[in-house]
Amino acid sequence: MNFLAHLHLASLANSSLPGNLLADYVRGDPHPHWPADIAAGIALHRRLDALTDSLPEVLSAKRLFRNETRRVAPITLDVVWDHFLSRHWNRLAAEPLPQFLAYAQKQIAPVLPQSPEGFQRLNGYLWRERWMERYAEADYLQQVLRGMAARRPRLAALADSWHDFHDNYPALETFFWQFYPQLMARAAAQQL
């Protein structure tokens, strides 16, 4: 799961939106350093990542990637799931995506001053450039993956992994519909 899915599932689970978005920037036990609700959101994010990575549909999706990109498939798939969520948002959520994102941004803004610098930088781009709305555009994912590859040279294969996404689009979309509504139901039932 990437940014949008984590925020969406957190909202369904009545979990901290800042905690769920912040999780990738916090190492170790968050409880000594963050308020209880944010620490719980970080923990939910981590459980969700572990759960998603072990789903049969996600494991099958990884096998669609070529040998040269399979190592980065989990990262690419996180972005791919956000693509399908953004693209089909109106089928999966009652509130329009721009309205949901405006609410999420307001929830996260108060946490920014005490958050890690990298998280602050991310938020500078995330909202201004409307990343999560633009994830709905399949071609935008190519730009996202290239940008990630440029920032992390050891993950250079990300730039080429867009082809795996593009070439396997219908199968990936089918996998998304097989598991994401189930995650939504589990989140709403507080079972994540």
Image (tube, grey):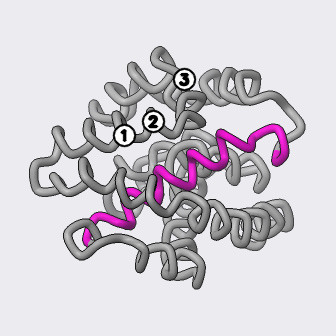
Amino acid at dot 1? Gln
Q: Are marks 1 and 2 in contact (CB under 8 Å)?
A: yes
Amino acid at dot 3? Pro
Residue 172 location, x and y as percent? 57, 64
Residue at 58% x, 80% y: name it.
55
Q: Nearer the viewer, residue 38 or 22?
A: 22
Residue 123 location, x and y as percent? 43, 26
Q: Could you say which disc has been placed on residue 142 in the image?
A: 1
Query: Magenta segment range?
Result: 71-92
At label 3, counting other C-alpha atoms closer than 10 Å, the crowd grade (few under 14, some 14-19, many 20 or more) is few
Residue at 20% x, 57% y: name it.
157
Q: CA distance from mark 3 to mark 2?
A: 33 Å
Residue annotated with mark 2: 139
At label 1, counting other C-alpha atoms closer than 10 Å, the crowd grade (few under 14, some 14-19, many 20 or more) is some
Secondary structure of the residue carrying numbered label 1: helix
Pair 1/3: label in front = 1
The answer to which quarter of the image holds residue 51 is bottom right
